[in-house]
Image (cartoon, helix red, strand yellow):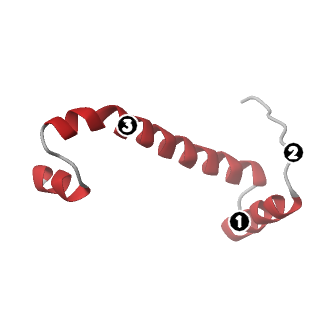
Amino acid sequence: MSVLTLRLEPDLEASIIEIAREQQKSKSAVVRDLLRGEIAVQRLHRARAELMPYAERIGVLTDEDVFKLVS
């Protein structure tokens, strides 16, 4: 595992400390979990942007359209 040094505003660090205490995790574990979540969200947005032209071509324009197709 590599080491990454970050500079955080005091309020952001306080939030991380609070979450770490609540979850009984280290600050590093909390930040890793948060980064994993954000990376997943970014990948989802990228995939959605790439697939939108194909979906629009077949008339899938809303989340409801998707649910109808997969239900």
The residue labelled by disc 1 is: 19
Residue type at the position of mark 1: Ile
The residue labelled by disc 2 is: 7
Residue type at the position of mark 2: Arg
Quadrant showing the N terminus: top right
Residue at mark 1 to residue at mark 2: CA–CA distance: 18 Å
User: x, y (%) of residue 60?
Assistant: 17, 46
User: x, y (%) of residue 12?
Assistant: 79, 59
Residue drawn at the location 75% of the way across and 68% of the way down: 21
User: x, y (%) of residue 38?
Assistant: 56, 47
The residue labelled by disc 3 is: 49
> Mark 1 or mark 2, which is nearer to you?
2
Residue type at the position of mark 3: Ala
Residue drawn at the location 71% of the way across and 65% of the way down: 19
Residue neighbourhood size for the residue with mark 3, other residues' Cα within 10 Å, grouped as few (<14), some (14–19), many (≥20): few
Q: Residue furthest top?
A: 2
Residue 49, picture quadrant: top left
Residue at mark 2 to residue at mark 3: CA–CA distance: 32 Å
Under circle 2, the secondary element is loop
Q: Nearer the viewer, residue 71 or 48?
A: 48
Q: Are marks 2 and 3 in contact (CB under 8 Å)?
A: no
Under circle 1, the secondary element is helix
Residue neighbourhood size for the residue with mark 2, other residues' Cα within 10 Å, grouped as few (<14), some (14–19), many (≥20): few
Taking 71 as reference, is 7 above or below it?
Answer: above
Q: Are marks 1 and 2 in contact (CB under 8 Å)?
A: no
